[in-house]
Amino acid sequence: MQEEIAGARRSLMNPASIPCARAYIKDAREVGAEKGCVLEG
């Protein structure tokens, strides 16, 4: 999951994909928190 968030962060370099990437990172963090994962960054 850490790699997926990193990939979404890299897509933030493309202005057209920023809203989608931010939403993806937020959702991934929430799922990780529910499962007890501690995600860095």
Image (cartoon, grey):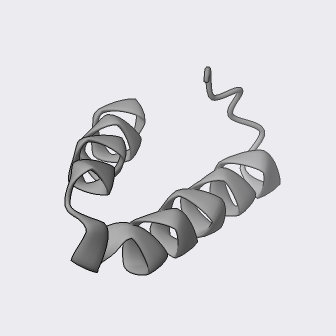
Determine which quarter of the picture holds residue 11.
bottom left
Q: Residue at x 52, y 57 (%)?
A: 25
Quarter of the picture containing the N terminus is: top left
Instruction: Relative to 24, say whether 35 is above or below.
Output: above
Q: Residue furthest top?
A: 40
Determine which quarter of the picture holds residue 38.
top right
Camera-side residue: 34 or 3?
3
Camera-side residue: 31 or 21?
21
Q: Residue furthest front?
A: 15
Determine which quarter of the picture holds residue 6.
top left
Please state if 25 lies on the left or on the right of 4 as rendered: right
Find residue 10 and report its horizontal and vertical position in percent. Answer: 24, 42
- So how many labels did they put on this image? 0
Instruction: Relative to 9, say whether 22 is above or below.
Output: below
Camera-side residue: 31 or 10?
10
Camera-side residue: 7 or 17?
17
Please state if 9 lies on the left or on the right of 36 as rendered: left
Quarter of the picture containing the C terminus is: top right
Instruction: Relative to 27, say whether 11 is above or below.
Output: above
Please state if 34 lies on the left or on the right of 1 as rendered: right
Find residue 14 and report its horizontal and vertical position in percent. Answer: 20, 61
Find residue 40 and report its horizontal and vertical position in percent. Answer: 61, 20
Find residue 33 and report its horizontal and vertical position in percent. Answer: 78, 48
Please state if 33 lies on the left or on the right of 7 as rendered: right
Q: Residue at x 55, y 74 (%)?
A: 23
Instruction: Relative to 13, say whether 39 is above or below.
Output: above
Q: Residue at x 30, y 46 (%)?
A: 4
